[in-house]
Amino acid sequence: MIRLLGSDLQWLELLRQVGVPLATERARCDVADSCASVVVIDRDPSPSESEGIRRFVSLGRGVLSSTKLAAQVWPGDVNCRSTRIRYLLPDRTAVFRDVGVTHLDTDGCVSASSNCGFTDRGGHALYAGELGGGWAVLLPFDVSAVLADRKTAPRAFHALAPRQVTETVSRVNRGEVRRIAANSLAYLLARQDLCYVAKPSVPPGGRSLFGLRIDTDFDAPGHYPAVVSLSGRTGVPFTWFLNVEAGEAVLKDVVNGLAGQDLQLHCYRHEVHADYDSNRRELVTGKELLVKHAVVPVGAAGPFGDWNEEWARALSDLGFQYSSEFALAYDDTPFRPIVDGSPSRVLQVPVHPVCLGRLRAAGATPQQIQAYFLDVARRQTARQEPNLLYGHPRNVAADCELTANLLDEVTALCGSGSTLTNFAAWWIERERVEYQVVQDDDALTLDVASSGSEVGIRVVRGDSEAVVPAVPGRVRLRELHWRHRERYIPTEPEIAGSIRLGRLAALREWRRRRQRQTAR
């Protein structure tokens, strides 16, 4: 069980996204009397709360905190120095398992005892080990602050191509922050000889989940049939986000030609506006035209991957269930952004931000393109997270044989496929599963208040894991079907290629953004 000291919305949403069981004790319950195994410090503790945390940890239990907040609880034991952190680099410690380069661009506080990972300045980044008679992971950044960062930045993505591959994405790589937090909880539980228990990130039946998002943008409908045939070959319908104005004259034929595919709304005009009224007007116009052709969209994707709170408010008011924008997050599991002081009613479904066209523009050969997307699939499969890609009809159809072979390999690697809409629906069902767990020496006792037939509970012990049904009952650990956990370890070229944005690449990205602003 995990206990959150306060009620910080960013931390709450992160823990719900991870899917760990949260202690449901009264808010005023003394931390020292908690039935939890780990307490997360999400705000400045009061003197009495600090005393409770120290007593809680002294019983051999764990604490997850920023270094800065931990120094308030243990002022004589935790020493730290303030520093600007551009990014964190992983090592092979448990806290950085399956983690790549973590872009933060934030003011941080590094413990003098740090022993895991590295900052961009070369020193160790965070501390994981004994503290106050128990165990602690001290992060060099404020999780709530970095998750609230809505800025974007051009980033490089490692690829074997003549030119650097870039895209403008969320400045903070939220997916890596989530992985570090989840790994920290797993580490703290393992130090207490307890299993790490959480909801899986993909439905039963596969190690990962493959899905392809198609943004029609300004591509001619003549490219669509080839893409539809590729979908038939994989046996997985693609999710098409339609640019309605660009195809308005032939919208009836487009909808008929995409029968059996998952049709959603990209935009009316290809733009996310800064104000609510313009965003609502664009979405209403696009949605009404689709409804006239018997398409009722529940998902949307912001043009150019853009996202802002006014876009999110308009989507929510119009009843959209999910959206997908890499200006907010990428290579992450679904979550609900905090808008107007509460989790949005619109689920965010992140995708990998590099499309096939970006690789072609960088001069990548067909073999290099295939190798790039297979590496992405292997990484997400090792993490047991969704592998959601995106592209455009013209580029997907440009070399059907290449794309067909790639999709065959990716689908086989992931083990299952889905539309983004079906995956979003599964995730919403996952959110509804509420459970608690009690562990003893050889068993878990699950108390499931709200279950889901397609949602299990993942149990991790060391390098082994198992999935059990999300139903109440007692589960003996020795009777579970354990399997070995894969591990993703980023290579040195991958790390280097992800942190060094070349001047020419940065200039091209700046020009691209300037051209977009001029077009608007």
Image (cartoon, grey):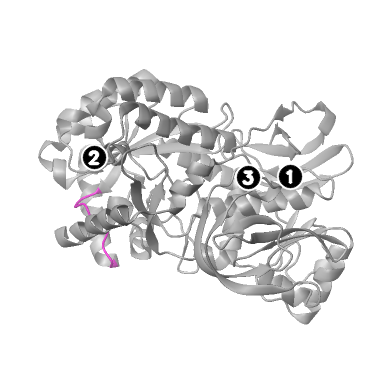
Residue 70: quarter of image: bottom right
Task: Give coordinates of residue 299: x percent, y percent.
Answer: 36, 45
The answer, for residue 236, to whether it is visible in the render is yes
Q: Where 453 falls versus 177 (above or below)? A: above
Q: Is residue 70 above or below residue 465?
A: below
Which residue occupies 16% across, 37% down?
251
> For mark 3, what is the residue?
433
Circle 2 crowding by C-alpha within 10 Å: few under 14, some 14–19, many from 20: many
Badge 1: how crowded within 10 Å, few (<14), some, or many (20+)?
many
**What label does residue 196 carry, if any?**
1
Task: Give the vertical position of 313 relative to 329 (above or below).
Answer: below
- Give the side of residue 245 with respect to residue 201, left or right: left
Q: CA distance from mark 3 to mark 2?
A: 35 Å
Residue placed under numbered mark 2 in the picture? 216
Q: Is residue 10 left or right of residue 55?
A: left
Q: Which residues are magenta?
A: 267-275
| Marks 3 and 2 close (CB-CB < 8 Å) | no
Question: Is disc 3 in contact with disc 1, using a CB cutoff of under 8 Å?
Answer: no
Residue 96 sits inside the magenta stretch: no
